[in-house]
Amino acid sequence: MKKSSVLGRGTVFALLLAGAAPATLAQEPKPTNRAEAVEVVRELRGIVTPDGVERARMVRIGGIDQFVSIRGRDRRNPILLILHGGPGFPETALAWWNTRDLEEYFTVVHWDQRGSGRTYLANDPAAVAPTMLPERFVADTGELITWLRTEFGKKKIFLLGHSWGSFIGLEYARRYPGQLHAYIGVGQATNTPESERRGYAFALAAAQRAGNANAVAQLESIAPYAVPGRPIPLEHIVIERQWSDYFGGVMAYRQRQTNGIASRLSPDYSDADAPRAYDGNNYSQLYLFSTVLGLDLSGITRLGCPLILLEGRHDRTVSSEVAHEWFVRVRAPRKHFVWFEHSGHEVMTEEPGKVLVSLLKYARPIAARAGDVGPEP
């Protein structure tokens, strides 16, 4: 009788412990629409530390309002400004997914460039069109860097350029190395015509190995591709990208790019803006894509600031092989090259953990030596 009584009380106590939390959670409403789901993401990623920063606002840059997101656990940490690719593919929409962990060690700045994302939606496209020039983007970058340095009292920042953003970033680093702790290239573009030729060769070889007659026929229909001295017709680019992407040249082991779906749950975009997050992509490419594919920055063989390249082994969108060949030749105060063996063009999404480890190993110590870091988390 006594034993039974003890077991009864223990059983009740165990049930209370095990059952209280699930019962409470069961009463919580489940998300039934995007707004409710986004609120879950927003709360989970909220910056609550005393010295943290969590700001999303329009900043006047280059004569227009441009959207900037600034997030970090400690505002004393070094600034990491990310220049997105595309042109016209804002990576602010991916930030809740692929750069959240970086916020523990850097103040991470995402920026929807002119013609992209919320900046595109906030301005008259016809009025902005005459300014859609590479030089204007370099100037915009300078204005934003100046604003950030003033706002946070920083002498230098880290500048990370991805894909199209790597054109802007490398050119800015070449001109103004004294403003940067380091330049970080991801999917670094250098000799784009050569990169295009290698991407095409990869796609054709992959199609032949797969016995995909349709792909082979379409790719052979645009041969010779990326002829030196001639612009690449846009319709040829579309065919090359279709099959290069299909065979894993943009995201390793995937037949299509899934990166953009993260925008569906991005707290940085309203319910009305989220479906239009990439409206500026076609607009931007109309003005910039042909120029981009003709650029050759491989003549830049010296940088005045440290250089870090993070490259996907399977990247055929912007050839990582071409980027490595350039890296070997370039001279910088210090330089590091990191291969991402399971990534294509979207390194920050495909291997975000290795991105964090790489930046902690090669970037943050540069800021630490300059006294530009907060306490270790």
Image (cartoon, rainbow, N blue to C red):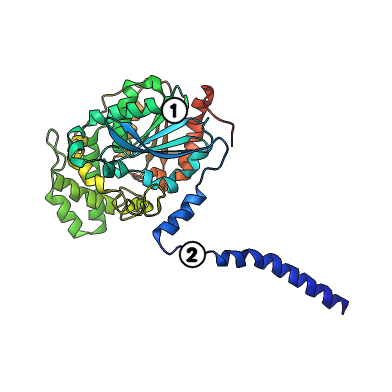
> Residue at (56%, 30%) from the top-left corner?
374
Instruction: Place residue 182 in its image quadrant.
Output: top left
Report how far apart the C-alphas of labels 2 and 1 lie in the structure.
40 Å
Packing grade of label 1 (10 A; few <14, some 14-19, many >=20) is few
Amino acid under disc 2: Lys
Residue 218 seen in this snapshot: yes
Residue 306 seen in this snapshot: no
Amino acid under disc 1: Glu
Instruction: Place residue 313 in its image quadrant.
Output: top left
Q: Earlier in the sequence, mark 2 or mark 1?
A: 2
Residue 124 shown left or right of residue 61 in the figure: left
Residue 150 shown left or right of residue 11 in the figure: left
Which residue is more in the foreground, 55 or 3? 55
Q: Whole-percent x and y of residue 42?
A: 47, 50
Q: Which residue is mark 1?
A: 151
Packing grade of label 2 (10 A; few <14, some 14-19, many >=20) is few
Q: Whole-percent x and y of residue 59?
A: 35, 34
Q: Whole-percent x and y of residue 355?
A: 45, 40
Name the quarter where the N terminus is drawn.
Answer: bottom right
Residue 181 shown left or right of residue 293 in the figure: right
| Circle 2 SS class | loop
Q: Residue furthest bottom?
A: 1
Which label belongs to residue 30? 2
> Residue at (26%, 52%) from the top-left corner?
206
Q: Whole-percent x and y of residue 111?
A: 35, 38
Instruction: Place residue 26 in its image quadrant.
Output: bottom right
